[in-house]
């Protein structure tokens, strides 16, 4: 998991793999407030963006999730978001496995979950070993706009 902000991009970008750089370039080169909601193809099904608007919910009502085939760059455009995160382990209790159909698995109660707070311009990068609980309320439920860049893990080898 990586947690940072676009303001630190120039100082940090040399440490990212090329595929993550290409995903971040989409974020940097587009007016994210004007992009239509939904899926935007960057490199077909290997690298694409999901522009989303949703109302945050209390932590207990959001399901923790992980992915097997894709890395997420979750970039907050507007609002405030709290995200829970913990490393996937044999202690993680799987409650719904949709990995084959939708590349997502959902988990029950987690131990040692830490919280990230995202403000506009902040992002978190989640790898297949990271369980994350996005779109949680920080203070009050609110509309957030975010862009999730999906990067197929095969791109890390290219």
Image: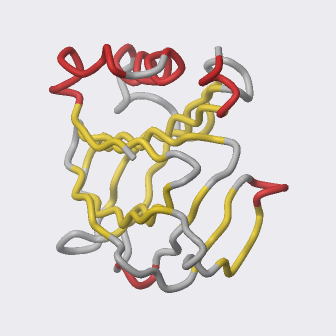
Q: Position of residue 40 (x, y in %)?
A: 60, 28
Q: Residue at x 52, y 74 (%)?
A: 63
Which of these two is toward me, 69 or 135?
69
Q: Residue at x 42, y 43 (%)?
A: 74
Q: Is residue 64 left or right of residue 158?
A: left
Task: Specify the quadrant of the image occupied by residue 15.
Answer: top left
Q: Is residue 46 left or right of residue 126?
A: right
The answer to whether 138 is drawn above or below residue 59 in the figure is above
Which of these two is toward me, 26 or 36?
26
Q: Is residue 23 left or right of residue 44?
A: left
Residue closest to the far right: 100
Residue closest to the far front: 90
Please, which colouring scheme is shown? secondary structure
Task: Specify the quadrant of the image occupied by residue 8.
Answer: top left
The answer to whether 150 is drawn above or below residue 97 in the figure is above
The answer to whether 113 is drawn above or below residue 150 in the figure is below
Q: Is residue 100 left or right of residue 5?
A: right
Q: Position of residue 80 (x, y in %)?
A: 23, 57
Q: Position of residue 47 (x, y in %)?
A: 63, 26
Question: The C terminus lies in which quarter of the figure?
Answer: top right
Which of these two is toward me, 47 or 128?
128
Q: Residue at x 35, y 44 (%)?
A: 124
The answer to whether 59 is drawn above or below residue 134 in the figure is below
């Amino acid at each position: 998991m990586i947690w940072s902000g676009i303001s630190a991009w120039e100082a940090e970008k040399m440490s990212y793999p090329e595929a993550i750089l290409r995903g971040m370039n989409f974020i940097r080169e587009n007016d994210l407030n004007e992009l239509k909601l939904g899926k935007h193809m960057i490199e077909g099904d290997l690298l694409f963006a999901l522009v989303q608007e949703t109302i945050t919910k209390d932590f207990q009502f959001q399901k923790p999730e992980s992915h097997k085939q894709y890395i997420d760059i979750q970039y907050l455009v507007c609002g405030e978001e709290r995200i829970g995160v913990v490393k996937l382990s044999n202690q993680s209790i799987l409650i719904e496995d949709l990995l084959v159909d939708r590349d997502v698995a959902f988990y029950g109660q987690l131990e040692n979950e830490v919280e990230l707070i995202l403000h506009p311009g902040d992002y978190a990068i989640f790898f297949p070993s990271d369980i994350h609980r996005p779109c949680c309320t920080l203070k009050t439920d609110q509309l957030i706009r975010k862009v999730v860049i999906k990067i197929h893990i095969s791109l890390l080898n290219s």
